[in-house]
Amino acid sequence: MFKLKWPQFPSPYWFNGRYSEHRGIVAEDGTVPVYGSALELLDGVMPPAGTEVIITPQRFHLDAETAEEVTARKAREAAEREAYQAQQDREYRDRQDKWQREAEAANALLRIPVRWTSGLKTVLSGLSQNSMGTGTNRRSVAHILLLEPLDAGTLHRPANSFLCTAESGTNGKQWTAQLHTLSVGSKGPYVSQITCRQCLKLASRWKDSDSGVAPELIRG
Ligand SMILES: [Zn+2]
C-alpha cells in the first residue's frame, strides 16, 4: 500500500460513481496517469513501471495498492470468511450435539412403563407451533406422548394421549392429527427433551423403577 497525491484538478470521474474502482498503470516517469492526470507519489514506494494499481480516494490523499495485492487481500479475506463460517457451523453442531446429549440424558431418567415419545399440543385452529427443528422444539413445551394405553393405579390414559392430560380433560379432537414431535440434531432426529412440568411430575413416580420403556422416535 502506498499513497498518491490528489491531482490539482481532479476529474469528476473520481466522484460521480461512474467507476466502482479506479485503476491505473504506473508510467515510466513514476507517475500513475488516471483520468487525464499524472498522479504523483505522496508516501511509500511506487511500484515499477507497468504495474497495475487500484486507487481508493481518501479525503486528503489517494490510497493505492497493486492489483496483485488487492487480489491477494481479497483471497485472504474470502478464506477468513470461510474459516469463520466453518467455525460457526462447528459451534452450531456442537451446540446441537450438547442439546441432544442433554435430552437423551434427561429422557433416560424417565421410567414410563409403556411405549412413549415426545409430543406437542398444537391446536387445530391455532397458529402452528409444531414445526420441526431444534430451535422451535426447544422453545415449545414437549410432553410425554403415550403410544400405548396406560393403567397405573389411579392413572389411566388411552393410547396416543399426553401423560399430563386426563381423558376427561382437554385431550381430544381439538389437537391436530399429529401429536408426536422430534428434535433434529446434527446427526439426525431424536426424541425431544420432555419439558412439560406436569408430565415430568407425573412421571416422577416411576423414577426408581427399572421397568421403564425407552422413548421411541416416531418419524413422519
Ligand atoms: Zn405434558
Image: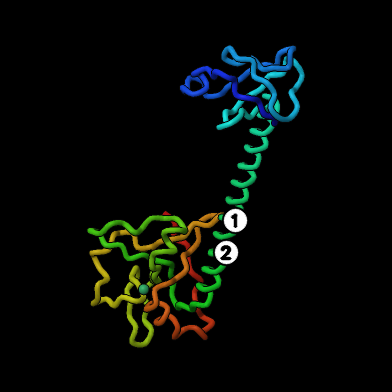
Q: Is residue 156 above or below residue 146?
A: below
Point 67% across, 16% down: residue: 25
Q: Quadrant of ligand 1?
A: bottom left
User: Quadrant of the rendered structure where residue 78 is?
Assistant: top right
Q: Is residue 108 above or below residue 99?
A: below
The secondary structure type at the circle numbered 2 is helix
Res 71 seen here? no
| Residue type at numbered disc 1 | Glu
Apparent side of residue 40 relative to residue 144 in the rendered image (left or right): right
What's the residue at 41%, 64% (across, down)?
139
Q: Farthest residue in the front direction?
A: 8
Mark 1: few/some/many CA within 10 Å (<14, 14-19, 20+):
few
Q: Is residue 111 left or right of residue 39?
A: left
Front residue of 203 and 37: 37
Question: Which residue carries the number 2 mark?
Answer: 98
Residue sitting at x 58%, y 22%: 22
Placement of 57 over or under 39, stated as above or below: below
Image disc number at residue 91: 1
| Residue 143 placement (x, y as % from top left) | 39, 70
Give whichever of 65, 159 is nearer the camera. 65
Q: Is residue 26 above or below residue 200?
A: above
